[in-house]
C-alpha cells in the first residue's frame, strides 16, 4: 500500500517498511511510483484465487498461506516437523498488510465463514494475536476445480 507522510498527518505510526514519498504539491512524482516497485515492496498471490474470492479475501488468504509456509520452513531449518496449525500476530498483519487488529480479526472471520480457514478449539482473533489457524487446502482446491468445470 502507498501512504503519504507529512508532519500534519495523524499520530498513527507507520511500519518501518513503509515507502516515504517525496511530496511535491500533493502529487506523486515518477520517482515516487518507481520506488513502489522496488524489491521487497511486492506481494504476490495466485490469480486463480480471484475465481473463488473477492480481491481483498484472495490477498488475505495468500498472506496466511505464505505466513504458514514461512513458519514451517523455519521449523524445518531447525530440524522440527512442519505443523498444520499455526498462529499469526495482529502486528504482522499491520506490518505486512497495514491492517489494524480489528481489521485482521475481520479478515480472518470472513475467511473462516467461507470455510477457507479453520480455528482450533473455537478460538477467535483477538487484538493481540490470531491463534491456531489452519488453511483448508481441500476446500480451496475443490472450489477452484468447480469454477474451472463451469
Image (cartoon, rainbow, N blue to C red):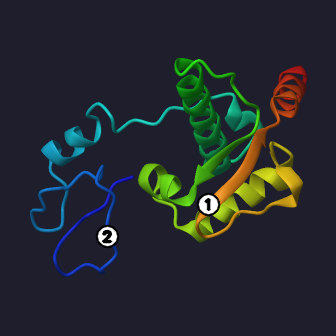
The picture quadrant where one finds residue 83 is top right
* Residue 21 vertical placement versus 52 (above, below): below
Q: Residue lying farthest front?
A: 79
In the rendering, at what x and y percent does residue 60 appear? Answer: 62, 47
Is 24 or 113 nearer to us in this picture? 113
In the rendering, at what x and y percent does residue 42 appear? Answer: 39, 35
Q: Secondary structure at mark 1?
A: strand
In the rendering, at what x and y percent does residue 136 appear? Answer: 82, 36
Is 27 or 88 nearer to us in this picture? 88
Q: Secondary structure at mark 2?
A: loop
Is 91 or 140 nearer to us in this picture? 91
Q: CA distance from mark 2 to mark 1?
A: 19 Å
Q: Dot 2 surroundings within 10 Å: few (below 14), some, or many (20 or more)?
A: few
Exactly how many numbered labels are in the figure? 2
Q: Which residue is mark 1?
A: 129
* Residue 67 vertical placement versus 28 (above, below): above
Q: Quadrant of the C terminus?
A: top right
Residue at 67% x, 42% y is 61
Residue at 16% x, 77% y is 7
Q: Which mark is residue 120?
A: none
Q: Considering only order in the chain, which callout, 1 or 2, is on the residue closer to the N terminus?
A: 2
Q: Which residue is mark 2?
A: 13
- In the picture, measured across the screen, residue 40 lies left or right of residue 115, that is left
In the rendering, at what x and y percent does residue 69 appear? Answer: 60, 28
The picture quadrant where one finds residue 46 is top right
Amino acid at each position: 500500500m502507498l501512504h503519504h507522510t507529512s508532519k500534519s498527518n495523524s499520530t498513527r505510526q507507520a511500519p518501518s517498511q513503509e515507502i516515504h514519498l517525496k511530496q511535491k504539491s500533493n502529487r506523486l512524482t515518477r520517482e515516487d511510483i518507481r520506488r513502489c516497485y522496488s524489491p521487497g515492496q511486492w506481494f504476490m498471490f495466485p490469480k486463480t484465487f480471484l475465481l473463488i474470492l473477492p480481491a481483498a479475501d484472495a490477498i488475505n488468504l495468500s498472506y496466511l498461506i505464505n505466513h504458514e509456509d514461512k513458519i514451517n520452513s523455519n521449523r524445518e531449518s531447525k530440524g522440527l516437523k512442519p505443523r498444520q496449525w499455526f498462529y499469526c500476530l495482529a502486528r504482522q498483519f499491520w506490518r505486512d498488510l497495514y491492517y489494524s487488529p480489528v481489521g485482521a480479526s475481520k479478515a480472518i472471520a470472513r475467511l473462516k465463514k467461507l470455510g477457507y480457514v479453520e480455528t482450533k478449539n473455537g478460538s477467535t482473533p483477538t487484538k493481540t494475536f490470531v491463534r491456531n489457524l489452519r488453511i483448508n487446502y481441500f476446500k480451496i482446491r475443490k472450489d477452484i476445480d468447480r469454477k474451472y468445470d463451469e
